[in-house]
Amino acid sequence: MPKIPHHPGNSLIDSPPTIQWDTDHIKIIDQTLLPSALKVIELRSVSDVVDAIGRLAIRGAPAIGACGAYGIVVALDEGYAAGGSNSTIAAKDILAKAAHLIGNTRPTAVNLAWAVERVQTGAMLGTSPEEVRSLALSIANDIFDEDRAACDAIGTFGAVELAEHKTILTHCNAGRLATAGIGTALGVIYGKAREGQEVEVFSSETRPLLQGARLTAWELSMAEIPVTVFPDSAGSSLLASGRIDAVIVGSDRIAANGDIANKIGTLSHALAARAASVPFYVAAPTSTLDPHTATGAEIEIEQRIPEEVEGFGDCRSTPVGVAVWNPAFDITPADLVTAIITEVGVLRPDYGKSIANALELASLANPPTPEEQQ
Amino acid sequence: MPKIPHHPGNSLIDSPPTIQWDTDHIKIIDQTLLPSALKVIELRSVSDVVDAIGRLAIRGAPAIGACGAYGIVVALDEGYAAGGSNSTIAAKDILAKAAHLIGNTRPTAVNLAWAVERVQTGAMLGTSPEEVRSLALSIANDIFDEDRAACDAIGTFGAVELAEHKTILTHCNAGRLATAGIGTALGVIYGKAREGQEVEVFSSETRPLLQGARLTAWELSMAEIPVTVFPDSAGSSLLASGRIDAVIVGSDRIAANGDIANKIGTLSHALAARAASVPFYVAAPTSTLDPHTATGAEIEIEQRIPEEVEGFGDCRSTPVGVAVWNPAFDITPADLVTAIITEVGVLRPDYGKSIANALELASLANPPTPEEQQ
């Protein structure tokens, strides 16, 4: 019987949460050490927060968003302790500086900037240093809780959508280590297990940083869900073998037409799934839908440093002086996507329409604040 | 100006050959040490030969075939020195035992068993220990020379076929490190350079054993041909980007219908090439064509040990206890293959016919020995 993490409520997993607020500091699992070591570290200053996000001790757009939001509260406490608590103006100055600093730690992670801005905007309404801090914490808690709820809803919708699919291929890590909740793609896996459905996962290792081998395999093992790791290069053959019932991945940005930006390698699995007539699902909260980007061609692909590919740990594989091409993401065209599972429901082609509808639904569920309406 | 290796004739590359016979022993580059160290080791006993092939110090079906063939000569010298040179019967006993031992070192490498059997069959005609040895060496030299000539011819045909294609994607290593000559897939690259054509290569790193990052990048760098390494997962995106003019790979076995067995990950590139309308070529000698295998579905796929995927050098990435799926090869359906470049010419669909014709041509070029005809 799998140990299913679920939110809200207590986790059944014998492991600390990915991110947690504790009185006056943030606790996170240091993901750079997984799976060799499971270590919780405390972030008690702005530099702690910036460092943790920058070196990928915490990663995954939703998880980074929550961390950045709580990071503003840490910044206020740090600033007040250093003598900035004697005026509301000084408090708002601390707020603005921290929002700028933390929000730019990883410029391509949309959720981080979004979350930090949301905390800043709300906390600016405070009329005392204490109220600025309490508003910031309240909004950070909202972001955290909304992410948990979105993951849960994605798990519920996904369990219905994939009810007949037992053996699932996933890529990278879009699980509880990437969110405040049970994850997006892996949220669907946990959702299936929660419903008592049989489920088994094949996880790509996900070069260069091996989030599949290190993180997805680890968190599914902890949940006692059967998981098999394969080299990225074996995904097409695995799909052609007939052993896979469905593919499910997360996303970093979804264009208005349904084109999907996700971890490099996603496109290979989508093409192989199409060739093998296996459904290809994307799971993501509506905050990942980007109505301002018409198609995937407009999405800038982050190029990462060659060192990630040149070796692993202390082992060097590529000869010195050889060029490396190391894009972080690829674009999967909408026509390869069977459906997009969100917290407001399952979106199907024509994505231009279904994405617009989902955004409308999401805005009704989370109406803008009076500040945002101005 | 690239430094083009070419055979016959002296190599322009400032590096020892992959394999070489020297009076009474074999010299090989120990490929397990590349690219960190370029070390030539000497194989002076049967156990040296078996060990080198078994631990992949020498790899690539044609290179292993040549090594196994010379290994028989090493075995005879070793046996004679130990007192087995006083009768022709004793010599043939040494021959048979060595052929069995060396030929089974890697059972899936078809070329090894083929080469060893060819040496054994020819040398059995000797009427003295000296003649047994001289026949064995002569046939081993034939195998070596024929492989070099086949690579050269593939390079020549390939340069014509790919004359308009500058930027080439390849997978794994089918180069001079995999053959006695200039390689098959990389033979075409060197063939293009030899003709003065501009050429640039994108090499997948080729997890799990990184033959692309370690070996292809190394040998192309030595030849001063521009090479860029990318994670296997980025191949589809690279092909979709429009930067690649053609894909070329080697093969371990080609079924009678043109289905291609090759290093795991080949299928991903073939699917992505088709999606991007990029031609997908296979380069292989006619000895790789297998008329006894009707389609790719009949080809058994070797499963390799999980340890290759669980980590990288001394760094462990996959949690202990997690299952691993690690197939060595995949099957690319013939309908994704633009053409097959062999030493007797370029084969095109319908492959059932063109492969049969190529085998007929090859058998005319290398008629069976009287022994084989019996």
Image (tube, coloured by chain):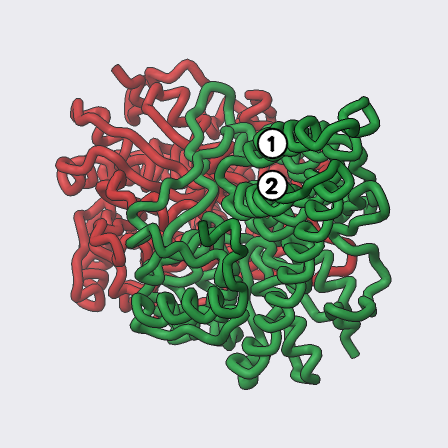
Chain colours: A red, B green
| A298 to the left or right of B147 | left
| B99 to the left or right of A222 | right
Q: Nearer the viewer, residue A350 or A115?
A: A350
Q: Nearer the viewer, residue B367 or B288?
A: B367
Q: Where does the image place residue A20, in percent across and percent down from the top left?
A: 47, 27
**What is the C-alpha distance between the residues marked 2 and 1?**
7 Å
Q: Where does the image place residue B187, in percent across and percent down from the top left?
A: 62, 67
Q: Nearer the viewer, residue A297 or B290?
A: B290
| A348 to the left or right of A105 | left
Question: SS of the residue at dot 1?
Answer: helix
Question: What is the number of the mark on residue B96?
Answer: 1
The chain containing the residue under callout 1 comes to B
Can residue A196 be seen here? The reply is yes
Residue A15 lies in quadrant: top left
Residue B310 lies in quadrant: top right
Q: Which residue is mark 2?
A: B120
Labelled pair 2, 1 in contact (Cβ < 8 Å)? yes
Q: Label 2 sits on what residue type?
A: Gln
Q: Residue at x 36, y 56 (%)?
A: B291
Q: Where does the image place residue A124, in percent across and percent down from the top left?
A: 48, 49
Q: Earlier in the sequence, mark 2 or mark 1?
A: 1
Q: Where does the image place residue A167, in percent across and percent down from the top left?
A: 25, 35
Q: Quadrant of the N terminus of chain A?
A: top left
User: Could you classify mark 2 by the number of other residues whose Cα lies within 10 Å: few (under 14), some (14-19), or many (20 or more)?
Assistant: many
In this rendering, is residue B354 above or below A211?
below
In this rendering, is residue B71 above or below B370?
above
The chain containing the residue under callout 2 comes to B
Q: Label 1 sits on what residue type?
A: Ala
* Residues at marks 2 and 1 on the same chain: yes
Q: Residue at x 75, y 36 (%)?
A: B129
